[in-house]
Image: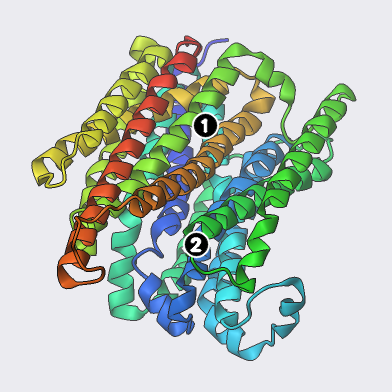
Amino acid sequence: MFISKENQEQQRRAAMLALLTACTAVFLTALDQTVVVTALPQIITDLQIPVVQLDRAAWIISGYLLGYVIAMPLMGRVSDMYGRRRVFIICLAIFALGSLFCGLAPILGSAIDLSFLQNIGLNVNSPGLIWLVAARFVQAAGGGAIVPVAMAIAGDFYGEERRSVALGLIGMVTEAGGVLGPLYGSIIVQNWGWQTIFYLNLPIVAILLFFVWRFIPPSVPLKERIDLPGALLLGASLVCLSLGLSQEAVQITSTTTVTTATNAPTQNNPWLLVAALVFLASFIALEIYTERRKNWPVVELSIFKRPAFSATSLLSLLVGAALIIAMADIPIFIATVLARPPLDSGLALLRLTAMIPVGALLGGWLCARITCRWTAILGLIPATIGFWLMHLWPLDVNWTQITVSTLIGGLGFGLVIAPIGTTAINSVSQRQIGMASSAVTALRMVGMILGLAALTSWGLGRFRLLAAAFNPPAGLSPFSTEYNNLYAKYLVSSAHEVYTAIFLAAGILCLIAIIPALFLKRP
């Protein structure tokens, strides 16, 4: 059928406006992943979180990540069934509702009695924190679903030839939001207070809703039911996994010389991990049964029979694990081994994260020219080299060494983003695009959870063994000034040994990831 140049231009403009609208929404939700990092000190003060319980404040970030991961598989599939525009609007509305309750958390904490939650083992000393974590979870449930739906929109509007560039653009704005989040948050907190961060989301979402309604076309709903049992089983598995791994970290970081009754609950940590495996096995069995009955499961497991999709899923998992190791370990290295202020830790990490959006856009351009396979390999090689150079950091590493290694690693991570999303979407049919993009994005987040847990458990365990092996010179009085200074230097050296070993392990992960990258589908 002949299509006039005028119609082609209209279709091109419509695709561009839809993509820009989706990218703006993705940027906003990605911004809120990291926006609270610089606001945490003021949040801790305002919510009256005791100094001895600062680890509870970490759930302000972890709760968002958990909601992100749980929502992705379900909402991506729902967008396949009920249309991108409808689901996009619902997700933005959920995100706005969560943002409103985040801002109201201190007020709600003072006005509503939550003491009944003690019956299920929750600490209610800071009720405002409970409201904030719950609101962040709801906020992420809407925000997390926007990323795969935006990827699906790109798959709808662009064919295989131009799809990689569109997905590269989405990857770029996702990472750019994470990079600019702390800066954006610090400016707002300094001038208007941390609640304003969340209140500002409301007018922005209102404007976005207009553009979504205007530029993303409606779809004809499919007469299928949502697989809620499957979604609940998958969500329960991820919750148990996250809680189990986080509590294992608490157990490892607790002082071994103190054995009190407060440590007893950590003995049950393995049961949470067992529960996660049971829920996962139940989810897999249910999805196989649902698919055989020709219904629409949350994830059609048959797509994993396709080598390209399985390869890109494994690649996404490994890249997520390696990336979180870099993002967690670099600031800690700068703060502990080099004893630099927090600003320097942030600047060191910025060198890595600033290159990821650049690499994501470049990777999308390269996919259409040298295939997704070689683009992914081209990204994993510098990512491996970057970690290898970090592994070589001496105790007195200078900023030139830090800059070179982090810039190389960040560029490598960015290059891998577009090949993962492009291969996932190209490997499935049109009606499976939302589900496929959700699956690979969620697997990346799961990789982050697993990578962070491995980093915590092995790293802290290794550091504890090294610290216990301290052997002072003969005749040196314990706890004297000379003894303490010598022990402090030994601990810094031990920490350096642990961190550089972790960098090496992350580099090995990137090297292993080349194997599944070889099976990525050619466009």
Q: In this view, does 450 lie to the left or right of 169?
A: right
Residue at label 2?
Answer: 256
Q: In this view, does 403 lie to the left or right of 14?
A: left
The image shows residue 128 at horizontal and vertical percentages of: 56, 80
Residue found 50% across the figure and 11% down from its top: 519
The image shows residue 155 at horizontal and vertical percentages of: 54, 27
Q: Distance between the residues labelled 2 and 1?
A: 33 Å
- Along the viewing direction, whichever of 19 and 255 lies nearer the viewer: 255
Which residue sits furthest front? 475
Badge 1 density bin: few <14, some 14–19, many ≥20, Cα 10 Å: many
The image shows residue 277 at horizontal and vertical percentages of: 73, 39
Q: Up-down: is 189 above or below 476?
A: below
> In the image, which is nearer the foreground, mark 2 or mark 1?
2
Residue at label 1?
Answer: 317
- Along the viewing direction, whichever of 252 and 406 lies nearer the viewer: 252
Badge 2 density bin: few <14, some 14–19, many ≥20, Cα 10 Å: few
Disc on res. 28 = none
Q: Up-down: is 214 above or below 157?
A: below
Q: Is residue 417 visible?
A: yes
Q: In which quadrant is the N terminus drawn?
A: top right
Residue found 26% across the figure and 29% down from its top: 388
